[in-house]
Amino acid sequence: MIKLEGITKSFGSLQVLKGIDLEINKGEIVSIVGPSGAGKTTLLQIMGTLDEPDAGRVEIDGTVVSRMKEKELSAFRNHRIGFVFQFHQLLPEFTALENVMIPAFIARVPSKEARMHAMEVLDFMGMTDRASHKPNELSGGEKQRVAVARALINNPAVILADEPSGSLDTHNKEELHQLFFELRERLGQTFVIVTHDEALSKITDRTIHIVDGVIKV
Ligand SMILES: Nc1ncnc2c1ncn2[C@@H]1O[C@H](COP(=O)(O)OP(=O)(O)O)[C@@H](O)[C@H]1O
Ligand SMILES: [Mg+2]
């Protein structure tokens, strides 16, 4: 599902990724762990086509993205990849429902259909009665659920999450982690999750350790 070969990346004179080879199978839930500054976010951004490597090959869902033009790439990203960040990144002036609908609008899904699907996803998260609330009226755990719903709305093949439970308390953390596994059961998505949470990395199918820009085995 995801195949990285020989990925390197520098920022100025700082080499952040020093040759990453990695293969992640369809339906796998993989965690990426490592010290702060090790290159985890950079790697996830490259996997998600939000950033480009200096060298190497990135293949997602059978498509070699390293050769795609920006316009093609943003459509690909919109359809095939869902993102969940540490801080929800919801738009404050829109309701939960509207936030979830945004990637569907970008994909030009008619609004009635987008609304129906967004409600279905929110319903699955137990968030039906919060749909018309704006982010500042939602708890941290609820905001993260909305962010996950937004990541799911276009049925992406892959969900990439960067410390998604980093700002949550223990209870909400566990619920969010549980949700990832429920989603995999139901929708068969592939998850790559950067985390500092040991409880999460223990229950994932595989943990990848990144130290100093390389995968430690
Ligand atoms: N856009 C950027 N410009 C310059 N340096 C960056 C940029 N993004 C990340 N870095 C640096 O690259 C290193 C790895 O960053 P990052 O991938 O965010 O690590 P992690 O997520 O593992 O904490 C850090 O030293 C960070 O300061
Ligand atoms: Mg990071």
Image (spheres, helix red, strand yellow):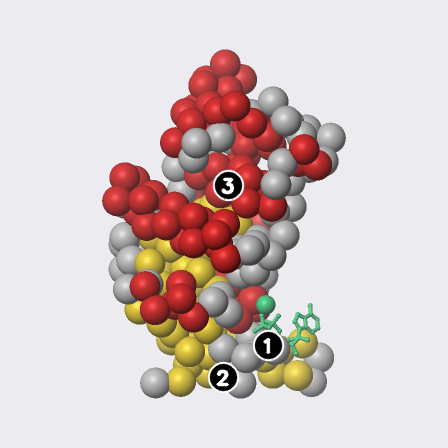
Residue type beneath disc 2:
Val
Q: Earlier in the sequence, mark 1 or mark 3?
A: 1
Between the C-alphas of marks 2 and 3, the distance is: 30 Å
Vertical comparison of 111 with 178: above or below: above
Q: Position of residue 98 (x, y in %)?
A: 60, 26
Q: Which residue is mark 3?
A: 145
Quadrant of the rendering where the N terminus is positioned: bottom left
Left or right relative to 213: residue 159: left
Residue type beneath disc 1:
Ser
Q: Quadrant of residue 2?
A: bottom left
Q: Give the number of the mark in front: 1 or 3.
A: 3
Residue type beneath disc 3:
Arg
User: Residue furthest toward the front?
Assistant: 171
Left or right relative to 51: residue 215: left
Q: Give the number of the mark in front: 2 or 3.
A: 3
Where does ligand 1 appear, by image quarter? bottom right
Vertical comparison of 152 with 162: above or below: above
Q: Which residue is mark 1?
A: 36
Q: Which residue is mark 2?
A: 211
